[in-house]
Amino acid sequence: MTSRKSSEKSPLRLADVCPDLVGEIGALLRDSHPGDPIADSISSLPFHGICRDYVLTAPEGTPSPWVIELEREQETVFLLGVDPSRSVVTWVDVLDGRDPSAALPRQS
């Protein structure tokens, strides 16, 4: 049996596409959930695009039965979908009015 490498380019990381968002989510997670390893994993999450205003960090349809609510000054600014293992963020809902698609590289 021969081994083949995929010709597909590996997905971008969320931190490459939305560095400000990643920094803010990481800081809010560390403040609200001290010691939670999810805060440290945010920067290495893959970027799978934006679907229905959600920033996807896993393929669309990935089960996300848990939601983490992040607040700034008693206002919810992010919702994070978390996989069944409670260890991987699968989507981010940005509720503070910014448009996450504005950070996407423009297609030529």
Image (cartoon, rainbow, N blue to C red):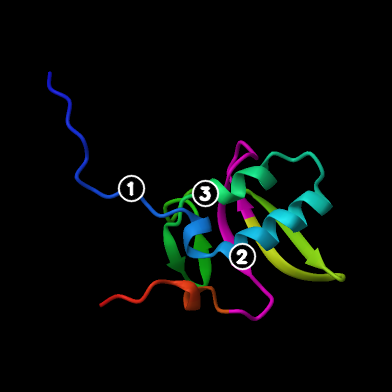
Within 10 Å of disc 2 (Cα), the crowding (few <14, some 14-19, many 20+) is many
Magenta highlight range: 81-98
Q: Position of residue 57 (x, y in %)?
A: 50, 54
83 over 25 or under it: above or below = above
Q: Which residue is mark 1?
A: 10
- Name the kind of residue labelled 2 in the image: Leu
Give the quadrant of residue 76. bottom right
CB under 8 Å between callouts 2 and 3? no
Secondary structure found at label 1: loop
Which residue occupies 42% across, 63% down? 49
Secondary structure found at label 3: loop
- Name the kind of residue labelled 3 in the image: Leu
The quadrant of the picture occupied by the N terminus is top left
- Name the kind of residue labelled 1 in the image: Ser
Which residue occupies 57% across, 50% down? 43
Q: Which residue is mark 3?
A: 45
Q: Earlier in the sequence, mark 2 or mark 3?
A: 2
- Image label count: 3
Distance in Å between CA atoms under marks 1 and 3: 12 Å
Q: Nearer the viewer, residue 39 or 88?
A: 39
Q: Is residue 70 magenta?
A: no
Within 10 Å of disc 3 (Cα), the crowding (few <14, some 14-19, many 20+) is many
CB under 8 Å between callouts 1 and 3? no
Within 10 Å of disc 1 (Cα), the crowding (few <14, some 14-19, many 20+) is few
Secondary structure found at label 2: helix
Q: Which residue is mark 2?
A: 21
